[in-house]
Image (spheres, rainbow, N blue to C red):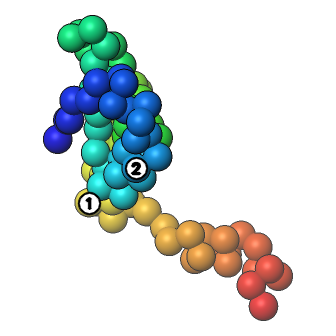
Amino acid sequence: MDKTIGISELRKDIASRVKEIHEDRSRYIIIQRSKPKAVLMSPEEVETLEIMADKEILNEIKQAKQDIQKGWFKIYEEFYRKQFPDSYK
């Protein structure tokens, strides 16, 4: 859930707000002169938004899910054990 915070209040207490964002996945809309100016969020959330905006990646994820449901996958260790048997002794 998004929370709003004035920029002057944020300046006073930024360390605890960053900790809260990290621990609780909170998001803050930063208000300056009664208008929203920026958003403060975790790096993971930014990464998620970037992925959601990339249709090519979303299609690849969708295809991977379908492949998994069909059983068209190999477990990492099994694949590499066959490819590089000397590494798994």
Disc 1 residue type (three-letter): Gln
Q: Residue 46, located in which quarter of the rendered image?
A: top left
Does residue 15 appear anywhere in the picture?
yes
Density class for disc 1 (Cα within 10 Å; few <14, some 14-19, many ≥20) is few
Q: Secondary structure at mark 1?
A: helix
**Residue 14 x, y percent position in the rendering:** 43, 40
At horizontal 43% and vertical 31% (from top left) the residue drawn is 11
Q: Are marks 2 and 1 in contact (CB under 8 Å)?
A: no
Left or right, residue 76 beside residue 59: right
**Residue 77 x, y percent position in the rendering:** 59, 76
Badge 2 is on which residue? 16
Relative height, residue 1 to residue 72 (above, below): above
Q: Residue 53, located in which quarter of the rendered image?
A: top left
Relative height, residue 69 to residue 60 (above, below): below
Disc 2 residue type (three-letter): Ser
Badge 1 is on which residue? 69
**Residue 67 x, y percent position in the rendering:** 34, 53
Q: Residue 84, located in which quarter of the rendered image?
A: bottom right
Q: Which mark is residue 33?
A: none
Towards the viewer: 57 or 15: 15
Density class for disc 2 (Cα within 10 Å; few <14, some 14-19, many ≥20) is few
Q: Secondary structure at mark 2?
A: helix
Left or right, residue 65 beside residue 72: left
Identify the image quadrant of the C terminus.
Answer: bottom right
Sequence-first tag of 2 and 1:
2
Q: CA distance from mark 2 to mark 1?
A: 43 Å
